[in-house]
Image: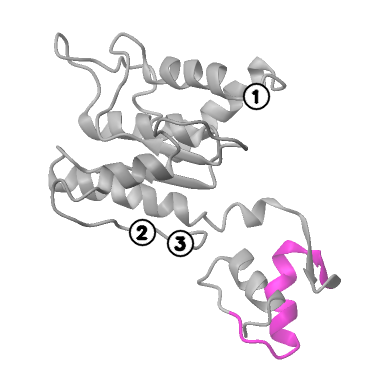
Amino acid sequence: MVCPGEILAMLGPSGSGKTTLLTALGGRLNGKLSGKRRTGFVAQDDVLYPHLTVNETLMFTALLRLPKTLTWEEKAQHVEQVIIELGLTRCRNSMIGGPLFRGISGGEKKRVSIGQEMLINPSLLLLDEPTSGLDSTTAQRILTTIKRLAEPSSRLYHMFDKVVLLSEGSPIYYGPASAALEYFSSVGFSTSMTVNPSDLLLDLANGNF
């Protein structure tokens, strides 16, 4: 079982069935599936249109895959968020490139492929050999990006003015988000300023202290 925020590495020699298993988990095998799709799948090869820019590629994906209930502006906001999260701001207006002309780097192409799946906000993101064909430095950057995406920054928590924390149906804290850890420290719970506040509060709500 893989819990939220965790990254699972699937290891095995060539031909052992890694891609087949990922394809099955991603719902890409032949057959009829029912229910809402909750997974994203990043293939080993980056299938991108060479003459589009990074921004155009992600916007085209957003227009095709995001719900029709969202406006063009809302879809553009999703694209902007993904570009920032994946560190693609510098190359957003650069063409993808291909065999006939140079475009963005291999690592940037992989991040664009990841971004296409991130747009649908999947509960589970599957990546088939995401570092294949990349040098060691670029591969490390890709894995660092994936790890960072799996562990959201505490900056998101601090964007909220107030927070209400529930446990077994009852509120155990309501007040300024910035004062939550200080409050629990004052009533005897051990808190740390080095961890994500939302993770710590969830542990407290679950009785893990």
Spot occupied by residue 175 in the image (x, y as percentages of width and height): 82, 66
Magenta region includes residue 63: no
Residue, far front: 31
Q: Which residue is mark 2?
A: 8
Is 116 positioned to the left or the right of 188 in the image?
left
Q: Is residue 87 visible?
A: no
Quadrant, the C terminus: bottom right
Q: Is residue 153 visible?
A: yes
Are dots 3 and 2 in contact, CB under 8 Å?
A: yes
Q: Which residue is mark 3?
A: 2
Q: Residues within 10 Å of mark 3 (few under 14, many from 20)?
A: few
Magenta region includes residue 188: yes
* Residue at image coords 31%, 8%: 51
Identify which amino acid the numbered label 3 is placed on.
Answer: Val
* Residue at image coords 48%, 36%: 118
Secondary structure at numbered mark 2: loop
Is 111 positioned to the left or the right of 169 in the image?
left
Image quadrant in which you'd find residue 77: top right
Looking at the image, tell me whether mark 1 or mark 2 is earlier in sequence order.
Answer: 2
Q: Image height check: is 84 above or below 12?
A: above
Q: Which residue is mark 1?
A: 67
Along the line of sight, the residue nearer the viewer: 201 or 69: 69
Report the magenta residues as a range.
172-191
Tag shown at residue 142: none
Along the line of sight, the residue nearer the viewer: 197 or 41: 41
Identify which amino acid the numbered label 2 is placed on.
Answer: Leu
Image quadrant in which you'd find residue 26: top left
Tally the marks.
Answer: 3
